[in-house]
Image: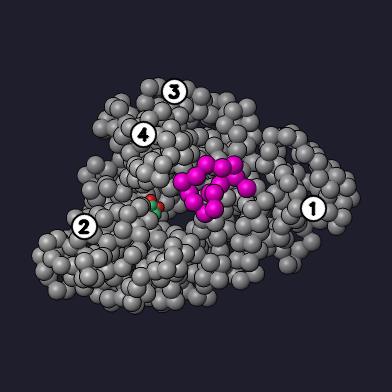
Amino acid sequence: MTDLGKKVIYQIYPKSFYDSNGDGIGDLQGIIQKIDYIKKLNVDMIWFNPFFVSPQNDNGYDIADYYNIDPRFGTMADFEELVKKLKEIHVGVMLDMVLNHCSTENIWFKKALAGDEKYRKFFYLRQGKEGKLPNNWQSKFGGPAWSKFGDTDDYYLHLYDPTQADLDWHNPEVRQELFKVVNFWRSKGVHGFRFDVINVTGKAEKLVDSTDPVEEKKLYTDTPVVHKYLKELNTATFGKDPESITVGEMSSTTIANSIEYSKPSEHELSMVFTFHHLKVDYQDGEKWSKIPFDFMKLKELFTEWQEKMDQGGGWNALFWNNHDQPWALTRFGDTGKYREKSAEMLATATHLMRGTPYIYMGEEIGMIDPDYSSMDDYVDIEAKNAFKALTKKGLSDQEAFGIVKSKARDNSRVPMHWNNEKYAGFSEYKPWLMPTDQARINVQDELAHGEIFDYYQKLIKLRKSEKLISDGHIKMFLKDDPQIFAYERYLEDSDEKLLVFTNFYSKEHTAKVPEKYQDKDFQVLLSNYDAVNGKLADEITLAPYEAWAIKIK
Ligand code: NOJ
C-alpha cells in the first residue's frame, strides 16, 4: 500500500456510466469506450459497484455468482480488457466485495434450501418462537429481518432485502469460501477491494431480541470478532500485496473501531467509509425526513473524525457522494447561480483533508438530483418501501414523495450526463433511470466551457505534489464560525502549513484570522475565485461559496 495519501479514487456505477449496446443499461464495454475521459482526471484507481451475476433486486448487491460477470454488463473477456486498458493508463481496479450476504439465487442458498447440511450452516437459520419470528430485528430496508426458509420450519436472517441472505461468518468454512472469492479476483490483476457493510459480519453469538433500534444495531455492528475476521481476510488475501488498497464500508461505526480497522499496524484494511457527516440533514437520526443540513454539526463531525483518526493513526476515505446518497450539491451546495462555486467549495473541503478522496462519477461536472415528479420514476426498492412506510404513518402522498425525492438513492444513480440529448448521450435506448437536467449539466459543455472539471484536475494534482496534503496532520480552527469551515494541515518536521478556508453559504462572510496566522505571507495553492499571494490580515472575507487553500511559513 504505497503512498496512500497521494491516491485519488473514482467511483463508477457501471449500470449508469455508459451504455455501449443500446439496451438502456451501462456496461463494461461502455466504460472501455470512455477511458479517454477517465484519463483526463488522473485518478489512481476506480471503484466499480458490483457487476457480478445477480438478479439485481438491490442493483447487484445481491450476488448470485461471485465468479462471473452478469451478462447485462458484459463478459469475463470484457472485464479482462478493462483491467488491461486501465493498467495502460496507470489506473487500478477496485472491486466491490459483498460478503456479508449473498442472493437467495446463489448456489449456496439453493443447496441449503435443498437440505444440504454443509450449506445450511452457511446461513443464519433459526426456528420461530411460539408462532413468532426468531427475534424482533428489523431489516435496514424496512420490515422484519427474517423470512421463511422455503417450506421448512426455519427462518433465515437478512439485514437487507429478503433476497439478500446474511452469511454466517462464525462458520470458518464460510470465511474460507469468501476469501477464495477475493483471491480469484486478485488473480485477475485486481488490487483494490471495497468491502460492503463489512462491520456487520460479526453477529452476536445469541440472536436475542433487541430492546430498541440503537441496542439492536449493537447486536450485530462492530463486534470485537469483526477485527479478527478482517485480520484473517488480510492474511489470507491481499495482505502481502504492496499495491493493495482496501476500504471497508462501515455501517454506524465508532472512531475507536475505525482506527483499529484502518491502522496499518493492525493489518486489517487501508481505510474506512463512515457516514456520520452525511446524516446532518436527518431529523432525530431519521433518514426519511426533510430538513436543512446542520452546518455546526457537520463541522463538529469532521473535526472529531479527522482529528481523532489522525491522533490514533487511522485513515479516512473522504467523500460526499456515492451510489447510496442524494447528490451533495443538492444537499449542501447550490443548484442554481452558485452551482459551480459550491461544487468546487465542497470538493476543496473534503479533498484537502487527511485521507483518500473518492469522486463519484458525475461529481466532477457538478451533477444534481433529478427532478422527478412521481414515484413511478424511481426504481430503488428502498425508496419504494420508504414511500409506503411514510404514507402508512399518515403522511399525504405529496409529503411522502417530497421526502423520498430528497433522500432516494436513485438520485445519484441517474445515468451520467454525457451531452444534452434526450437520454443524455448515455444510451440510444430509454435508460433504466431517466436523466432530467442534461440540457444544463453535461460532460460536453463542462469540458468546453465549465470550470468544475478543471478544478477537480487541480485538486488531484495538488494532492500528488504537496506533502502537506498527502501526509500532513490536521487541526481545525474557526470552530464556532457559522459559515466557514477551516483547517490547518501541518507536518512535524516543517514550519510550512496549509490553511484551507471554505464558505458553505451564498452570503459573503468575514471572519477573524487566528492570531498565530496573522501577518504571515501566504502563497495561494488553489481557489475558486481569483486570488493572489499576499499577507494575512487580522480578518478575511470570503465570497459566496469561496474556497481558499494557502500555504504559509
Ligand atoms: C451498501 C451498499 O452501498 C448498498 O448499495 C447496498 O444496498 C447495501 N450495502 C447492501 O448490500
Where disc 3 sits, the SS reads loop
Identity of the amino acid at label 3?
Asn
Where residue 248 appears, as percent x and y from the top left, is 44, 62
State yes or no: Cβ of the residue under disc 1 lies below 8 Å from any atom of ligand 1.
no
Spatial CA span between label 3 and label 4: 24 Å
Identity of the amino acid at label 4?
Met
Q: Residue 104: which numbered mark, if any? A: 2
Q: Residue 478: which numbered mark, if any? A: none
Q: Please say whether residue 90 is one of the residues in the magenta stretch.
A: no
Task: Return the residue at label 1.
Answer: 552
- Residue 416 vertical placement versus 130 (above, below): above
Location of residue 206 (image quadrant): bottom left
Task: Return the residue at label 4.
Answer: 375
N-terminal-most mark, 4 or 2? 2
Where disc 4 sits, the SS reads helix
Where residue 264 appears, as percent x and y from the top left, is 52, 71
Foreground tag (3 vs 4): 4
